[in-house]
Image (cartoon, rainbow, N blue to C red):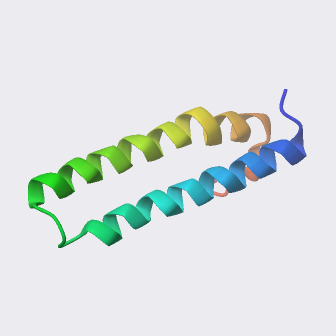
């Protein structure tokens, strides 16, 4: 099982990664074709989904108190 302190750090890193990925869309909006933007948006969405399911869900299952969505 993940130690709580480690889980908290993982959560912080994961949320920071989501924030950074979101900046990709802000930076590219209006600066590429609509097709390229949609491809970037899909990549960002899939990446955020993986972070949620493979990192945040694991931590929050072990420590529900770290889940700020509940």
Left or right, residue 1 beside residue 13: right
Q: Please name the residue shown 54% across and 42% down the image.
A: 52
Q: How far across and how far down the image is residue 42, in percent?
A: 28, 46
> Outermost residue toward the front?
31
- Asked whether residue 31 appears in the rendered view, the answer is yes
In this picture, residue 44 sits left or right of residue 66: left
Considering only vertical position in the picture, is 52 above or below 29? above
Query: Is 61 or 18 nearer to us in this picture?
Result: 18
Name the residue rendered at 83%, 32% in the picture. Answer: 2
Q: Quadrant of the N terminus?
A: top right
Residue 39 locus on image (x, y percent): 21, 48
**Residue 63 horizontal/vertical position (percent):** 79, 41
Query: Which image quarter: residue 46?
Result: top left
* Residue drawn at (72%, 39%) of the image: 59
**2 lies left or right of 67:** right
Q: Quadrant of residue 3?
A: top right
Percent from the top left, x then y, of residue 22?
42, 62
């Amino acid at each position: 099982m993940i130690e709580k302190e480690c889980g908290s750090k993982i959560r912080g890193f994961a949320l920071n990664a989501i924030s950074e990925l979101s900046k990709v869309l802000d930076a590219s909006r209006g600066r590429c074709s609509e097709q390229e933007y949609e491809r970037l948006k899909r990549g960002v969405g899939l990446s955020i989904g993986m972070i949620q399911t493979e990192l945040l869900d694991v931590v929050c299952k072990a420590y529900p108190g770290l889940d700020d969505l509940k």
